[in-house]
Amino acid sequence: MSKVFFADMRCPVGTSLLHKLEKLLDKAGFAQLPFTKRYAAIKIHFGEPGNLSALRPHYAKVVADKITALGGRPFLTDCSTLYVGRRSNALDHLESAWENGYSFLSCGCPILMGDGLKGTDDVEVPVPGGKLLKTALIGRTVMDADIVVSLNHFKGHECTGFGGALKNLGMGCGSRAGKMAMHSDGKPQVNPRLCTGCRFCAKHCAHCAISFGTDGKARIDHTKCVGCGRCIGVCSFHAIDSGSFNANDALNQKIAEYTAAVLAGKPHFHISVAAQISPYCDCHGDNDAAVVPDIGIFASSDPVALDHACIDAVNAAPALYSDGQSGDHFGNIHPGTNWRTQLEHAEAIGLGEQKYEIVRV
């Protein structure tokens, strides 16, 4: 049974969450990784500017300083997005990171884009145990690293149910072509009965796939649509959903397979901060109220166990979102998703195990 180390958010006078994170890393065996003279990629989501629930750079500095103290060469990294926004190329992405406080001074290490200037600098690598995919297109810089450390903000997601360690690595390390390959099983469709013609979805479509008829209702041109699902997340009226009933399941499974490709043959470690647990991804330039109260910080060498522990902790917490339903909080918010498929498939292909033991720090 995999061990997942956990520290809650309580901090007596004289301590801080950063102290607790450092202690958590020590207890979780972070120092056992072979950092000496090796390049260590800290995979992080810098947050779309305007989103205030994404991780602050202070967490990254604790991790980077620890790696440096252990003789390693850390750097922060992420890959370009598939959709419109301020992180779809290296220049905009780096400016967004700086705007959100990420820099060499604040984090203690450089920031390197994982897939080059335009999101096209990738490497095609095998997917060990892949069922849906045999190869994955991963950012070259990520693959050049000797060690991979995942540092993520645990939150909800409109297509996958939740975003944790697996999504941070699988979707996050894919190049633009890799992200398209993961999203390609389903194309969104519009329910004209629910569409109000507000045109907000069109503003967020990077591929000009959404138009409007004489009735003012949205229409999606599937010859232009790449299936990124951005329009699903930004529609406030639930008028857009996946056009394929199993599209989100396939997406979750492909994320697991991309994660397997990233981690194959590399030492790795995973940290999840379960605070300001928003219902949507940090890719949005805004954020809604938290789903549940802040929980704490989790760490493990097993990304599957880590994500399952975070999900269980969220579901055990009282709901703050919407009508206060209990049980499966992310499932209640995003009923068209089934987050279990990501964990089940990840376990099936040997990424880790869902059973875990919590070790409180």
Image: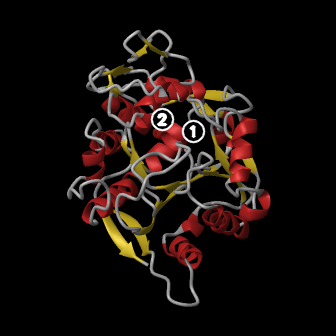
Residue 283, compared with residue 329, is above or below; it is above
Q: Residue at x 56, y 58 (%)?
A: 55
Tag on residue 173? 1
- Give neighbour class at mark 1: few <14, some 14-19, many 20+ (Cα, 10 Å): many
Q: Which residue is disc 2 drawn over? A: 258
Q: Residue at x 24, y 58 (%)?
A: 324
Residue 275, compared with residue 351, is above or below; it is below
User: What scheme was used to colour the molecule?
Assistant: secondary structure
Query: Are dots 2 and 1 in contact, CB under 8 Å?
Result: yes
Indicate which disc, 2 or 1, sits on the residue closer to the N terminus: 1
Q: Residue furthest bottom?
A: 13
Which element is circle 2 on?
A: helix
Q: Position of residue 179 (x, y in %)?
A: 52, 29
Q: Is residue 222 left or right of residue 80?
A: left
Q: Is residue 70 left or right of residue 260?
A: right
What kind of residue is marked 1?
Answer: Cys
* Disc 2 versus disc 1: nearer the observer: 1
Residue 222, compared with residue 102, is above or below; it is above
Which of the two residues, 163 or 83, is positioned nearer the viewer here?
83
Q: Residue at x 49, y 83 (%)?
A: 11
What kind of residue is marked 2?
Answer: Tyr
Q: Residue furthest front?
A: 215
Instruction: Indicate the quadrant containing the C terminus: top left, top right, bottom left or bottom right.
Output: bottom left
Q: Position of residue 311 (x, y in %)?
A: 32, 56
- Give neighbour class at mark 2: few <14, some 14-19, many 20+ (Cα, 10 Å): many
Which element is circle 1 on?
A: helix
Q: Position of residue 2 (x, y in %)?
A: 35, 61
